[in-house]
Amino acid sequence: MRRATVPPHRRQSGFTIFELSMAVMVMAFALATSLTVIQMGLRAMDTARNTTIAAQLLQSVMEDLRMLPWSATSPQNSVSSLEAASSNNTRGNVTLDASFTNGDAAATAMVNRFTLTRNITDIDASMKMIDLTAEWRGIDGRAHSLKYSSYYGKNGLHDYLVR
């Protein structure tokens, strides 16, 4: 009796259902972890971008304050483009006028995400300490802040360096 031969196209073996399910699980795991890593990367990039913007805002405000004459930094006086210094330690007491962003709507919206606070403290009769703080919320909803501190001497940089 002669044996029946199997046609060549039926002799090729394929993947079993177990092998296929394992491959799908490995791909699903790889996709889920890569999405998590991308999400963490975007969060870190947002934090870095906002920290840079906050640093630029604080540096600009600090330079504006350091360019003022000595008498303008006293807590009783109003400072141009800033609210009255009597509002020290009040959330959001630093306001940036339209000249800061040249009227650009996108720049204004970006700057408005930040709350800037300042505090001017008398160290002694000829020295003041200026603290500026920027606060914002990241894309993940977490609160962030950045603080700059500087000294302002009545007689200029010499007072600061000698102390």
Image (spheres, helix red, strand yellow):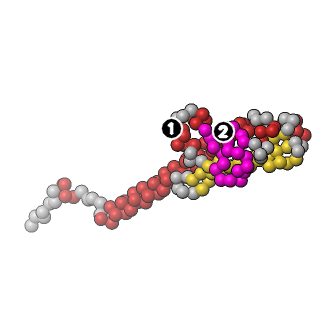
Real-space Cα distance between discs 1 and 2?
19 Å
Question: Can residue 19 be seen?
Answer: no
Q: Which dot, 1 or 2, sits closer to the camera?
A: 2
Q: Describe the element under mark 2 as helix, strand or loop.
A: loop
Residue plotted at (71% across, 40% down): 79
Q: Report the side of 138 relative to 125 (left or right).
A: left
Residue 148 in percent (x, y) is at: 72, 46
Residue 93 in percent (x, y) is at: 66, 48
Residue 24 in percent (x, y) is at: 36, 60
Residue 102 in percent (x, y) is at: 56, 32
Residue 74 lies, with reference to residue 22, above or below; the image says above
Q: Report the side of 53 relative to 163 (left or right).
A: left
| Amino acid at the residue labelled 2 | Ser
Instruction: Give whichever of discs 1 and 2 has the lower sequence position.
Output: 2
In the rendered image, residue 92 lying in the magenta stretch gets the answer yes
In the rendered image, residue 75 lying in the magenta stretch gets the answer no
Q: Report the side of 152 relative to 88 (left or right).
A: right
Q: What's the magenta bit mostly, secondary-structure-wise?
A: loop
- Dividing the image into 4 quarters, which one contains the N terminus? bottom left
Callout 1: few (<14), some (14-19), or many (20+) C-alpha neighbours within 10 Å? few
- Dividing the image into 4 quarters, which one contains the C terminus? top right
Picture quadrant of residue 156? top right
Residue 23 lies, with reference to residue 123, above or below; the image says below
State the residue position of label 1.
105
Q: For the magenta stretch, what is the residue range?
A: 78-97
Query: Which mark identifies residue 81?
Result: 2
Between 8 and 24, the one nearer to me in the picture: 24
Q: Report the side of 34 relative to 96 (left or right).
A: left
Question: Can residue 28 be seen?
Answer: yes
| Amino acid at the residue labelled 1 | Ala
Residue plotted at (52% across, 43% down): 109
